[in-house]
Image: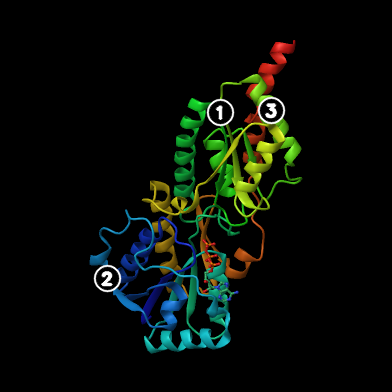
């Protein structure tokens, strides 16, 4: 084994730094040198390399983002760009590349594997939790905490003013952040990409009106996944305001969901997966993601992480569907009884 390279790629996620730390320390304990390329695949192509030493890793795990920086780099889909990356990796005498990122990054890793002979190991790092083959991805737990705390804050002002809020959360095309933050913040409604059938405007409006009737002096919070409602959260709030006659306030949470110090769960997960990635390299693995299933570290072929859908846990969906709206329904029932 000559040298390991690490990149963080795609959307940054809290915990990526802790993961880099685990890779660097584990590799050095095995006598293997580690370098990082800044800005993901672009950094490999443009040779933005830096040595990574355990001494420099002492204070990184607490920090959000990624000190190695990340990038969206669509040029990496081109054959010539991947070939250039392969040349750079060979120039640096790299035997194995660790890619910390989401499904796009793993597609990029698979693309690179067609042009480079070294070992490639993926570590799931995305707040969206949308990679199959792992129960959880680095950054997801912190993003849910962040969304919940933000919704709690909106809830306080909403409650004071008896307002309706439509809160848009991230997730790309998956409803994990939406579902978990809706449960944790006791939202009155949720709209997620996986819901079939999708809630329709009249039904949503009707629920708001029922809640208003039962609790005229209370708040009402809808959690909406991004990239779902045509025109986004502003269009939905507009349509609901018109349909109900009640002003519905749009509130996109935006990029605050990516930031912040990783929570304990993310730090632990990151370090577990980072250490396991180096062990997998030493065992000769390549073309796999190191994930966590039922609390055990697993190796999953990269293509199986992005070619398969990852369903929401139906028990959690039912939990939220069972709890949301029950309060006002039961109060109306009591009064009409
Ligand atoms: P997140 O979902 O958290 O944003 P991600 O890893 O899915 O993370 P993307 O921007 O989709 O983020 O992908 C990261 C990078 O991977 C891209 O900018 C590009 O450099 C590379 N990549 C994505 N798809 C491909 C592909 N089909 N072929 C080659 N490279 C790709």
Secondary-structure class at tag 2: loop
Q: Position of residue 34 (x, y in %)?
A: 33, 75
Question: What residue is at 50 percent from the left and 74 percent from the top?
Answer: 73
Question: Which residue position holds label 1?
Answer: 219
Mark before the other along the chain sequence, 1 or 3: 3
Q: Which residue is mark 2?
A: 53
The span from disc 3 to disc 2 (Cα, nearest Å) is: 60 Å
Single out the mark in the foreground, 3 or 2: 3
In the image: residue 186, left or right of residue 318: left
Alpha carbons under labels 2 and 1: distance apart: 51 Å
The residue singled out by tag 3 in the image is 209
Would you say residue 191 is visible in this rendering? no
C-alpha span from label 1 to label 3: 12 Å
Above or below for 55 versus 142: below
Instruction: Please tell me which residue is depicted at 61% across the width and 21% down the height of the picture.
Output: 216
Looking at marks 3 and 2 on the same chain, the residue that comes earlier in the sequence is marked by 2
Nearer-N-terminus badge (2/1): 2
In the depicted structure, whether residue 39 falls above or below residue 188: below
Residue 162 screen position, x and y as percent = 54, 26
């Amino acid at each position: 084994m000559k040298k390991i390279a690490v990149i963080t790629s795609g959307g940054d996620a809290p915990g990526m730094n802790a993961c880099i730390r685990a890779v660097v320390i584990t590799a050095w304990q095995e006598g293997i040198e580690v370098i990082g390329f800044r800005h993901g695949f672009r950094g490999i192509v443009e040779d933005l390399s830096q040595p990574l030493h355990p001494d420099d890793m002492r204070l990184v795990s607490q920090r959000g983002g990624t000190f190695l920086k990340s990038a969206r780099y669509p040029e990496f889909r081109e054959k010539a760009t991947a070939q250039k990356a392969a040349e750079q990796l060979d120039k640096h005498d790299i035997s194995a590349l660790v890619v910390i990122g989401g499904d796009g990054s793993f597609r990029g890793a698979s693309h690179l594997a067609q042009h480079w002979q070294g070992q490639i190991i993926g570590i799931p790092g995305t707040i969206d939790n949308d990679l199959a083959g792992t129960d959880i991805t680095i950054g997801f737990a912190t993003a849910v905490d962040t969304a919940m705390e933000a919704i709690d804050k909106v809830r306080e002002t909403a409650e004071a003013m008896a307002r309706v809020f439509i809160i848009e959360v991230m997730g790309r095309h998956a409803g994990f952040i939406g579902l978990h933050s809706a449960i944790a913040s006791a939202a009155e409604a949720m709209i997620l990409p996986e819901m079939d059938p999708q809630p329709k405007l009249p039904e949503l409006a009707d629920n708001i009106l029922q809640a208003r009737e039962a609790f005229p002096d209370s708040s009402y919070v809808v959690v909406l996944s991004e990239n779902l409602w045509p025109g986004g959260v502003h269009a939905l709030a507009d349509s609901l305001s018109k349909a109900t006659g009640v002003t519905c306030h749009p509130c996109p949470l935006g990029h605050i969901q990516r930031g912040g110090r990783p929570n304990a769960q993310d730090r632990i997960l990151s370090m577990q997966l980072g250490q396991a990635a180096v062990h997998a390299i030493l065992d000769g693995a390549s073309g796999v993601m190191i994930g966590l299933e039922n609390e055990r570290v697993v190796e999953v072929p990269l293509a199986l992480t992005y070619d398969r859908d990852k369903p929401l846990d139906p028990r959690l969906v039912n939990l939220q569907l069972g709890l949301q709206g029950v309060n006002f329904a039961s109060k109306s029932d009591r009064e009409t009884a």
